[in-house]
Image (cartoon, rainbow, N blue to C red):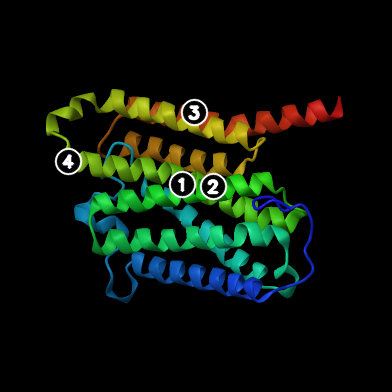
């Protein structure tokens, strides 16, 4: 078995497996504590209100409407479910958990660190952390694709969890970067906002297509990206800063990133049946 490929169930547990299980639980716990602070509990400031409102739904032309962020509830529930499931004795010596466990833990830590950075540091640092999170999620998802799940539970607790996280963070990286750039570019650049916004959304759609093709049609990343893109469209259609061209481009991009993985999966299924 290679370092990055799990091909069979391992039956002999080691102390390193227990350390990994505890590490995952600790990482997810840290993420949850940061999330609670991020919603304004314990006297903290809500994320959308920090950084001079740069991260709010009206902070840039590529900020999704506030309803979009409800997807975090789904991601957090799945991350907690994964942490509990991977801690079961049956998963302790699982070869796939040995490949993915620490990487998923790293994504949880970086997720929490982004919230810490948003609360207590600077906007450029939030961009750095979310880019690191995106890269880590991309690699974790790649490992999940290279090591196909055995059964529904593995697919749900690992692949769908990581896939949704990846898809949303891919879009959140764009929104976060846009918020930062909006704060530092000259005001007159706003005249080119429509053109730049549409160009960025084209790139986002291409990234979604690339993920779908590279993963053999995994739908979770596209669903999360599509969700965020729909709400970017809503935000630009009904809220400030208003831009109907960007709204339409976002809705088209949403359709692309959702439909392409379905088409890839259907094509593969038809080819296998032929």
Of pointers 1 and 3, the one earlier in the residue sequence: 1
The span from disc 2 to disc 1 (Cα, nearest Å) is 6 Å
Q: Where is mark 3, residue-wise?
A: 206
Q: Position of residue 59 (x, y in %)?
A: 25, 45
Residue drawn at x 56%, y 36% is 211
Kindly indicate the quadrant of the structure image that contains residue 38.
Answer: bottom left
Q: Position of residue 147 (x, y in %)?
A: 70, 49
Q: Position of residue 137 (x, y in %)?
A: 51, 50
Give me the disc on residue 184.
4
The span from disc 1 to disc 3 (Cα, nearest Å) is 17 Å
Q: Position of residue 108 (x, y in %)?
A: 48, 62
Residue drawn at x 29%, y 40% is 178
Find numbered disc 3 in the image and state the secondary structure of the residue it sits on: helix
Of pointers 2 and 4, the one earlier in the residue sequence: 2
Residue drawn at x 64%, y 56% is 158
How many numbered marks, from 0 up?
A: 4
Most foreground residue, 137 or 256: 137
The span from disc 2 to disc 3 (Cα, nearest Å) is 18 Å
- Looking at the image, residue 229 sits to the left or right of residue 148; the answer is left
Find numbered disc 1 in the image and state the secondary structure of the residue it sits on: helix
């Amino acid at each position: 078995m290679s370092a990055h490929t799990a091909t069979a169930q391992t039956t002999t547990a080691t102390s390193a497996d227990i350390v990994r299980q505890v590490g995952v639980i600790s990482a997810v716990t840290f993420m949850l504590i940061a999330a609670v602070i991020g919603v304004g509990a314990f006297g903290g400031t809500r994320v959308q209100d920090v950084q001079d409102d740069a991260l709010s739904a009206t902070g840039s032309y590529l900020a999704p409407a506030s309803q979009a962020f409800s997807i975090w509830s789904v991601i957090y529930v799945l991350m907690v479910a994964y942490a509990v499931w991977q801690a079961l004795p049956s998963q302790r010596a699982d070869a796939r958990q040995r490949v993915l466990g620490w990487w998923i833990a790293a994504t949880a830590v970086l997720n929490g660190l982004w919230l810490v950075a948003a609360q207590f540091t600077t906007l450029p640092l939030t961009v750095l952390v979310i880019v690191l999170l995106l890269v880590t999620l991309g690699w974790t998802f790649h490992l999940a694709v290279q090591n196909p799940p055995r059964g529904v539970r593995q697919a749900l607790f690992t692949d769908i969890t990581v896939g949704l996280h990846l898809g949303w963070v891919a879009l959140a990286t764009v929104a976060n970067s846009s918020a930062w750039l909006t704060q530092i570019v000259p005001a007159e650049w706003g005249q080119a906002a429509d053109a730049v916004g549409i160009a960025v959304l084209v790139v986002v759609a291409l990234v979604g297509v690339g993920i779908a093709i590279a993963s053999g049609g995994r739908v979770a990343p596209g669903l999360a990206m599509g969700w965020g893109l729909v709400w970017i469209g809503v935000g630009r259609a009904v809220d400030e800063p208003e831009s109907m061209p960007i709204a339409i481009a976002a809705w088209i991009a949403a359709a692309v990133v959702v439909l392409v993985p379905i088409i890839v999966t259907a094509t593969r299924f038809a080819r296998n049946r032929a």
